[in-house]
Image: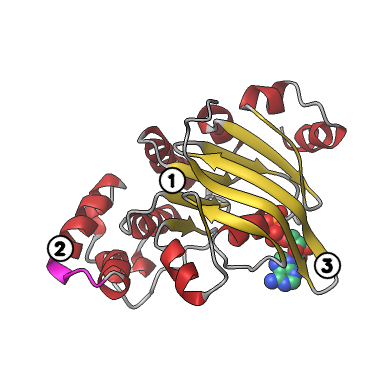
Amino acid sequence: MTNELKTMVKMEHIHKSFGKLKVLLGVNLTVYEGEVVVIIGPSGSGKSTLLRCINFLERSQKGNVYINGKIVERKERAINAMRQNVGMVFQHFNLFPHMTVLENVIEGPTQVKKIPKKDAVITGEAILEKVGLLDKKDIYPVMLSGGQKQRVAIARALVMNPSIMLFDEPTSALDPELVGDVLAVMKDLAQEGMTMVVVTHEMGFAKEVADRVIFMDEGIIVEEGTPEEIFDRPSEIRTKEFLSKIL
Ligand code: ADP
Ligand code: MG
């Protein structure tokens, strides 16, 4: 990794507690342009909180976040501006049930970015085609499978043209046979050079697509490395124990 690479996300000494519960104990994380970073770790170790601190869905008590080299000021306006650059996909898709697939996808561009509807439709349709759902554009989310809903959620994030995408267990709520289509869309994105931070239990995806794997436990990054380093020769006992339970 050369220092010519652009830093897309930097978390510096991030501390986050909920009441007395300390969830992040001074996390440092740097993600470079085009990098795919996969975060693994036990339930409750702070993976979602870490992701949510990147785009300020949670506010850390200490530490700074930089997006595209710029510190994120703790002000509503700066946070909203930053969020246009950082797409997020959740375990549960959070689509608007009363809107069609296409309406879901163009909501952000028309309402947040104030792009004329006809232009948003052109972009929205192109992105739906990319995730393989253009033929579903006029139906309502209730008619879709979980995998299709998640691909709409990905399209809805991508249509904002983010420079970073965060994924929080995007396939955990899906029936096993639907997982592959969603992972395929994510893999395409990675190959196109999208900077991605992905929390997942899909170790196959991590091995194949991640540039770097991070193992978190009890609010700290215990170990990080290439997929080979983490999966084939982890150095920390906690990493070994975790992997022995899931692999
Ligand atoms: P993971 O994603 O690794 O499973 P989380 O980041 O969701 O872990 O949660 C880490 C810890 O923080 C857990 O103990 C969880 O119960 C707690 N936690 C997460 N969000 C909140 C919240 N909004 N309020 C209180 N506790 C929370
Ligand atoms: Mg989580």
Q: Are marks 3 and 2 in contact (CB under 8 Å)?
A: no
Part of the protein shown in magenta: 114-118
Estimate the spatial distance between the alpha carbons at disc 3 and disc 1, rounded to whole Å. 34 Å
- Mark 3 vs ligand 1: CB below 8 Å: yes
Q: Is residue 210 above or below residue 123?
A: above
For mark 3, what is the residue?
A: 21
Q: Is residue 40 above or below residue 20?
A: above
Secondary structure of the residue carrying tag 2 is helix
Residue at horizontal 55 percent and vertical 26 percent from the top: 1
What residue did someone put label 2 on?
Answer: 119
- In terms of image quadrants, where is residue 57? bottom right
The picture places residue 158, in percent across and down from the top left corner, at 35, 54
Q: Amino acid at mark 1?
A: Val
Is the image coloured rainbow, by chain, by secondary structure, or in one colour?
Answer: secondary structure
The quadrant where residue 144 appears: bottom left
> Mark 3 or mark 1, which has the lower sequence index?
3
Give the residue drawn at x 36%, y 67%: 141
Between 185 and 139, which is closer to the camera in this rendering? 185
- Pair 1/2: label in front: 2
Give the spatial CA distance, label 1 vs label 2: 26 Å
Q: Is residue 95 left or right of residue 73?
A: left
Hey, what amino acid is under mark 2? Asp
Q: Residue 182 bears which disc, if any? A: 1
Q: For this rendering, which residue is in front, 102 or 144?
A: 102
Label 1 CA crowd tier, 10 Å (few <14, some 14–19, many 20+): many
